Every structure is written in structure tokens, then in C-alpha cells.
Amino acid sequence: MADGRRRVWRRRGERYANTCIEERGRWKCYDMGRPFFNQTDTVLSITLHSCSLTVNKSKMEQSIGSDCVVEIRDIPESRQSPIKSKILLLEKKNNEDAFFVIDLGEIVRKYANWVRKLPRVKPFYAIKCNDDYAVLKILADLGTGFDCASQVIANIQILNLDVDPGRIIYANTIKQTSFLKYSAGKNVTTMTFDNEAGLYKIKAVFPSARNTSRKKDGVKVIAKPGRYFVTSAFSLAANIIGKRVMSRHQKNEDSLPIDSSVESDDAAIMYYINDGMYGSFNSLYFDKAALIQCVLRDKHGKGIVHSSSLWGPTCAGVDCIVGKCQLPELSVGDWLCFSNMGAYSIVSGSTFNGMPRPRHFYNCQPDIWYVVHFGLDNTY
């Protein structure tokens, strides 16, 4: 960023303007012409809206919740760039664990697009699609409703974010009686039904509930998007932890492929990565997701591709991520990137065989972050 870059905005409901000016890679913010935080030569710390903002040189980190840190940075057009930067940092620490990079600004852009194109349709985010805390926090701050399917989700994840019960819809049409009683106690009054028996059950337990039929259109139009908000915001980086070159045609006495060399015409390469079908890639099985993979670094640089397959780390026979694909020759320690991994991936992933879940790293562009969390009128 060039020095002297200026951003001016107005707080919602207030008449005065706020200005942020970039000087030597750091942002200085002014409230009615006066600085409302002070900067030292190295680190700046302020508190706004009960959030701790730390700025170190040109890098800003925002904490939401107890252990969720968002790096505030201008994200380039290529989604691989933040991943490559993170890989370089992790490799310096000899860390090869798989990880997600999440662009929270992408979720905000999707919300803005929704409001522009469907202004009369209220979105109730389907939490079952992705229950990541930062995702829920961003959507809660934007004002979306939430589609909950159980007492646990409504209590722990949504009501604890101080979301008004009126913004929650209990959308599971098959409900336990205890869940209905819980909803009544928490004043979560909107729920769905799709058969007569379900309606009578709601009436008996929670007669003041407002019921929405899933089969009929009403005056108020609502929707329950999930994939729309989160799919493109999540990218996964996984490390190649094993490699085996096999012959596609030659078999041993047990009818199993025998080892071969890459130079062989019938060679096929099996790559093992540190996330798999029991983890983030379960969406390939349960949600029939389409996988988009890319090579982050082709060390050999020959431009030659080989018949390849991708496998997870569990050594289970069903842990096959991609049965057949074309990839350049890669080495153990190289990385693969998978985009559009936000929907039905982390929610269903397990730690089967002791395999850890990928860590989450969050990014958001400055303009978007200030609009959402500091109540500033701007465009995104």
C-alpha cells in the first residue's frame, strides 16, 4: 500500500465523519478530526466495541471470541497467495499440518449480493452447512437469521452470540418434545412443519409457536441458504506425506499392482495427504461436492503430468479422495490446495484414527472488516 492512502466513512446514525490515513504502512484513525487511538513505533493496541485490535506495522489482527484471530489484510485476486504465505511461515516452524484459509470478506460480499438481488427474501443461514465460529459471528453481525435443527445449536452457538430469538427458525420438521420445550423457554417461536402430525405435536407442546409450512408459500418469503455463503470462502492446504509409484497394468501373485518407476509408460502415482475422506473431504461422499485441486509448487518444473490418485492418511481402503487425476510429479513435503471447501466439510469431519482436524486461519480486507464490526457506512 502506498503511504497517504485515505479512507473516510460515517458511523451509522451519526453526523460526523471518521478518517483513517495510512502512514508508513500503518493506519491512523481519527474521530471528528482527533486521533481515537495512539500509535507507538512498533505495536498499537486499542479497544473498540469490546474488541481488541492489535496493529503491528502494516499487519493488523482482530480478535473475535477467545481464540479466533482474524488477519486484516488486502487479499489479492489469487486465493493461493494467502495460502502460499502461510505455508512459508509454517515451514519455518517445521509444521506440515493441513490448514484452512478462510476469507471472511467473501462471506460479506455474498451477503451484500443477496441483499441487492433479493431484498424481500430474508436469509436464515443453515448452520448445519458450516458451524465455524467466525462464520457465525460475521453473519450474526450482518443481521442474518439462523436455521437451527437442534437445541444444542440454538443454545451454544447462536444464543450465546446474543442473537435475538426472533432471528432463529427451528427448521427441523421432526422435533423431540424436549427441544420444543426448550424453544418455548428461550422464546424461539418460529419453526417449520411438513405434516399434520408434526403440527399437532407443536400445538400440544408450544401452542404460541409461529409455524411455517415447508410446502406452501406465505406472505413473508424466507430462504435457508448454506452453501451460498461459505463454499467459496474456504480453501484447504494439505501436505503430501507419502508417495508410491505403481504399475497400472502389471500385477503380483496377489493381483496387486507392483512398484514401478515414474519413467515407465504405465506408471501411476499414489499420493497420500494429511486430510482425507474421514476429515474435510467427507463432503465428496455425503454432499457429492466437486473437488477443485491445484499444485502450489512444481519443483520438477517439467510440465509433464502423470496418472495419479489422492489418498487420505488413515490407511483405510475407503480413504480415496480422487481415484484418477493428472498431476505433475510431486515430492513428499509438497503442498496441494483445494478451493471451494466451505460447505459440509468441517461439520462432518472426524478425528478417525487419531488424525487431527486442520487449523483455521482467517483473513478479511480492511474496508469490509470496519464496515461489519465498527458500524461504518461504506460499500463492499
Image (cartoon, rainbow, N blue to C red):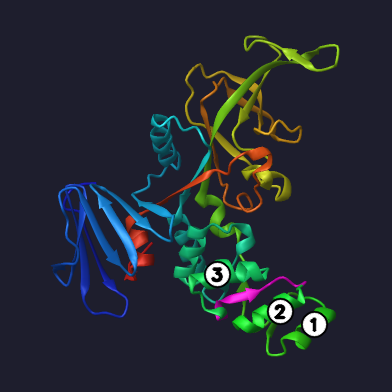
Secondary structure found at label 3: helix
Magenta-highlighted residues: 166-174
Q: Are marks 1 and 2 in contact (CB under 8 Å)?
A: yes
Within-10-Å neighbours for mark 1: few <14, some 14–19, many 20+: some
Residue at 71% from the left image edge and 79% from the top image edge: 180
Q: Distance between the residues labelled 2 and 3?
A: 17 Å
Along the viewing direction, whichever of 46 and 57 lies nearer the viewer: 46
Q: Are marks 2 and 3 in contact (CB under 8 Å)?
A: no
Along the viewing direction, whichever of 354 and 22 lies nearer the viewer: 354
Between discs 1 and 2, the one toward the N terminus: 2
Q: Is residue 177 visible?
A: yes
Asked if residue 162 is positioned above or below residue 21 in the image, the reply reads below
Look at mark 3 in the image and give the residue it sits on. Answer: 158
**Magenta-span inclusion, residue 167:** yes
Asked if residue 305 is positioned above or below residue 148 in the image, the reply reads above
Along the viewing direction, whichever of 105 and 190 lies nearer the viewer: 190
Identify residue type, mark 1: Lys
Look at mark 2 in the image and give the residue it sits on. Answer: 180
Residue at 68% from the left image edge and 42% from the top image edge: 352
Asked if residue 339 is positioned above or below residue 207 in the image, the reply reads above
* Quadrant in which the C terminus appears: bottom left
Between discs 3 and 1, the one toward the N terminus: 3
Q: Where is residue 12 in the image (x, y as percent from the top left)?
A: 32, 76
